[in-house]
Image (cartoon, grey):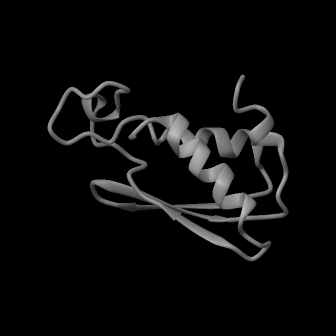
Amino acid sequence: MHLFEFALRYSINMEKYSDREGRVAIHSMLPPNFPEASRGRMTLNWIGDFWRLIIALRKFRPDFNIIVLDYGHKLKSRLRLGEFRRDIQGNYGS
């Protein structure tokens, strides 16, 4: 479940049920090395490609206020959700 598709689905669902002032914290966004960032598990510690969510949100939801905080091994992101739009959900299958 450390794959981009799951992170995107979580994001879509969180946005659906949040109001305009909603905040979301997401962890495991900065893997320390390539093996931990891969789609397939190669190491004991595995983050997967959750980090791709930030790229997708910046592309499809530029209205989000995304703040990235580096906490060493893991990167946390806080998103200020705006009005729900179906842009990212409509592009999910693309």
The N terminus - image quarter:
top left
Q: Residue furthest left?
A: 44
Quadrant position of residue 21: bottom right
Question: In x, y percent, where is residue 7?
Answer: 52, 45
Relative vertical location of residue 28 with respect to residue 76 in this rendering, above or below: above
Q: State the residue at coordinates (26%, 39%).
A: 46
The C terminus - image quarter:
top right
Question: In x, y percent, where is residue 42?
Answer: 21, 26
Q: State the residue at coordinates (74%, 59%).
A: 16
Front residue of this view, candidates 61 and 1: 1
Q: State the residue at coordinates (57%, 51%).
A: 10
Answer left or right for 13 relative to 26.
right
Front residue of this view, candidates 93 and 39: 93
Quadrant position of residue 83: bottom right
Quadrant position of residue 17: bottom right
Question: In x, y percent, where is residue 5?
Answer: 54, 35
Relative vertical location of residue 92 with respect to residue 58 in this rendering, above or below: above
Relative vertical location of residue 36 with respect to residue 63 in this rendering, above or below: above
Q: Say if residue 65 shows up in the picture.
A: no
Q: Say if residue 44 shows up in the picture.
A: yes
Q: State the residue at coordinates (80%, 72%).
A: 20
